[in-house]
Image (cartoon, rainbow, N blue to C red):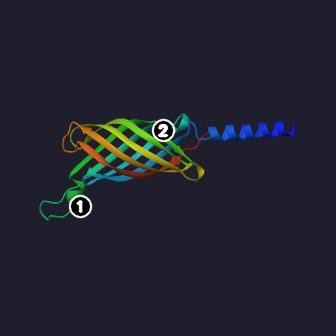
Amino acid sequence: MKKYILSLMMGLCVSVSSFAQSHSDRISVGAGALYQRGLYATISWEHETRYHNAWEYFINGYIKWDECASCGHVCPESFWNNYRTWGIGAAYKPCVARGRNNYGNLRIGASAGSDTDKFVGGLHVGYEHNFALRHGWGLFVQAKCDLTLPKREDLFRTGIVIGFKIPTLKK
């Protein structure tokens, strides 16, 4: 009888703990550098489904700086006023690698937004690796490549983004 109760308790604990991270929601904040002379920032809401697959809904901003024509250096005028975009989009992130306290997702998505004058659309492909921290927090590193249309000034953006995932409160 003791063995039966013990095995039932262990089975219940294992099933509860394996379901604990499923269907969780997180807010992500990340920033990074993109080739060539670009900075990128994003805020997103992520809903994790089974097996660490996830849907992400994001808002991003991008700034590309250049050297100033008059002084030959990067000055505040050439940094902030060269080329800027923002976008709103969604990405599906299927899990492709799992480990102890870490997992990796392929990131496939699209966005729509604007530079300061016209419409800009984007297709996003990349890899995101997540590391579990305490109390549901997470650290992520993203290697990304964005295809930006219709403007040819910045067709491909490739770079690295690092950020944190903050768990949302459940009722």
Residue underneath mark 1:
76
**x and y percentages locating residue 62 in the rendered image:** 30, 48
Query: Quick one: which residue is furthest to the right in this view?
Result: 1
Residue underneath mark 2:
95
Q: In this view, does 129 lie to the left or right of 74?
A: right
Q: Is residue 71 left or right of residue 132?
A: left
**x and y percentages locating residue 161 in the rendered image:** 38, 51
**x and y percentages locating residue 125 in the rendered image:** 35, 39
**Which residue is located at x 32 percent, y 40 percent?**
87
- Look at the image and tell me in which quarter the N terminus lies: top right
| Amino acid, disc 2 | Cys
Q: What element carries label 2?
A: strand
**Which residue is located at x 82 percent, y 36 percent?**
4
The answer to which of marks 2 and 1 sits earlier in the sequence is 1
**x and y percentages locating residue 127 in the rendered image:** 40, 43
- Look at the image and tell me in which quarter the C terminus lies: top right
| Amino acid, disc 1 | Pro
Please state which of the two labelled residues, at mark 2 or mark 1, is closer to the viewer: 2
Q: In this view, does 24 lie to the left or right of 84?
A: right
Crowd band around label 2 with a 10 angstrom C-alpha radius: few (<14), some (14–19), many (20+): some
Q: Do the residues labelled 2 and 1 touch (CB within 8 Å)?
A: no
Q: Is residue 133 left or right of residue 142?
A: right
Name the foreground residue: 26 vs 33: 33
Q: What element carries label 1?
A: helix
Tell me how far mark 2 sits from mark 1, CA to CA.
41 Å
**Which residue is located at x 32 percent, y 47 percent?**
61
